[in-house]
Amino acid sequence: MATYFDPKSWSPLRAVDLGKRLFDQSWLEQWISVSTSWVDPMADLGAGTVTALMPDVLMTMLSEGILSRFGGQEVSATVLGHDLHATLQVLKVRRRGAHFQTKTVLSRMRWDDHPIETVTVIAHGVRLIPGVPTRLRASHLDLDGTVTIAALVGWLNKQQLDWELSVAENGLIKASHRRRRLTAQVDASVTNNLLTVEIRRANWLGIRMPRQLITAPNMLLDQLPNHARIAHATRDGDLVRFRIDLPEMTGSFDLAQIRSAIVTGTTLIVF
């Protein structure tokens, strides 16, 4: 079990001083020549103040190490079984009471096969529990990002819908029914998982139909992966701006693998 210190008695200067004494070489050289004590710091560094401050030291070393190696460059990672490729723009860690808050900004991202222009991930209530493996927990995550309409349409066309979608010249979505000779131009938005579709124009057999004759019912998106909630998603030109809330998430990683990935610039793995 991880031991956390009383934040009232902690100061950043104490953590920095401890880090200097523990890591008298540069942190990267220290990781290259690391002993097994890094793999199991809780067992080898003992108890008391050192053990209490280890989460701070680890968070500092990990965030600074990843940013110094991959900042402004493409980073590859396997996160909970998903492939991620993106350019790392920002990685910040700050203490919030007894836990941490992290902010990560990525651009030109691919999540598995899904392209995303930008995404900012703020993880709240982050706890780092040293051990083998080291565990990472977050009470909840906020994701703000942008995706092109073309990319979104490409993903929706893989969902075996009754409609084939494309992007119209005016930026709206053109929907053509796969069996009926019905086409429409629509706009859509999501608020609190409720999808609202607005039909701008519709044609049947090439004949324009009065919009009041065609309605699109609202749809509740209540079975999203990982119990996600889409706070909002709206079209802005050829982009869709979205915010997604995720509940508590847990992951683990091997410090030795992370160290090797930072030193060699290879894939980071969180499982």
Image: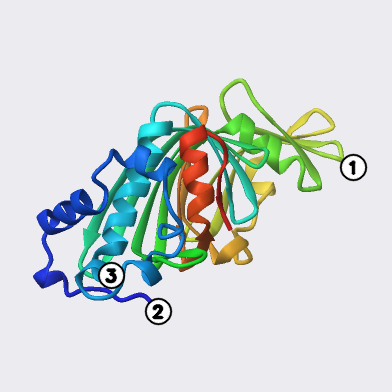
Tell me the amino acid under the disc marked 3. Thr
For marks 2 and 3, the one nearer the N-term is 2
Tell me the amino acid under the disc marked 2. Met
Near-viewer residue (3 or 105) = 3
Q: Which residue position holds label 3?
A: 51
Q: Is residue 246 above or below residue 72?
A: below
Tell me the quadrant of the picture where the C terminus can be found. bottom right
Q: Can residue 30 be seen in this snapshot? A: yes
- Left-right relation of 116 to 223: left
**Foreground: disc 2 or disc 3:** 3
Q: Which structural element holds mark 3?
A: helix
Near-viewer residue (244 or 69) = 69
Q: Which residue position holds label 1?
A: 179
Q: Which structural element holds mark 1?
A: loop
For marks 3 and 1, the one nearer the N-term is 3
Tell me the amino acid under the disc marked 1. Arg
* Residue that sits furthest to the right in the current view: 179
Q: Which residue position holds label 2?
A: 1
